[in-house]
Amino acid sequence: MEVKKELQKRYKNANEVYKDIKDELSKYAVIESTHKEIENKKTKSEVNSEVIRILSKAGIQDKDVGNVASIVANNYGRANKKQRIYSTIVAEYEQKRGLNIYNLIKNNV
């Protein structure tokens, strides 16, 4: 959208110019967003370490920390990973405790 505004500042026929170049611009936007996603994506081991750190700091028992970290690792990189992780944790630890555990880690998976 910034390109369109900039064109409007510089050209009287900005809408026509934008129509001519918008397909090319969209290609670059897709490439740029994909590049940002790749940069922001954590490795499975980084996420696993982060989950262990968060749960340990929250006072979750060691056996549960390992189990939840394993659940996260097994689902990391899969489609609907957050939903799968949430469902598995709730199934394992029941609704209240499972939700508490999931809420601790959800922003890091």
Image: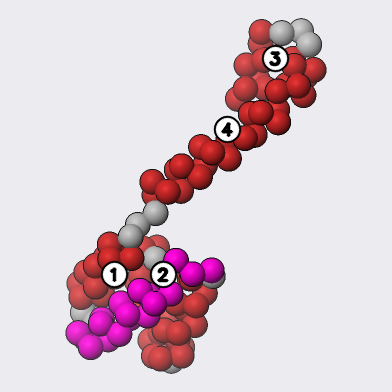
Residue 43 on image: x %, y %: 33, 60
Question: What's the residue type where badge 4 is placed?
Answer: Tyr
How much space separates mark 2 and mark 4, taking CA atoms? 28 Å
- In this figure, which residue is indicated by the disc labeled 2? 76
- In this figure, which residue is indicated by the disc labeled 3? 8
* Residue 100 visible somewhere in the drawing: no
Q: Which secondary structure lies at badge 4?
A: helix
How much space separates mark 3 and mark 1, taking CA atoms? 48 Å
Q: Which secondary structure lies at badge 2?
A: loop
- Vertical side of 14 occupied by 68: above or below: below
At label 4, counting other C-alpha atoms closer than 10 Å, the crowd grade (few under 14, some 14-19, many 20 or more) is few
Rendered-image quadrant of the N terminus:
top right
Quick one: label 2 or label 4, which is nearer the N terminus? 4
- Vertical side of 51 occupied by 46: above or below: above
Residue at (54, 68) in percent of width and height: 79
Residue 94 on image: x %, y %: 43, 92
- Vertical side of 13 occupied by 105: above or below: below
Which image quarter: residue 11?
top right
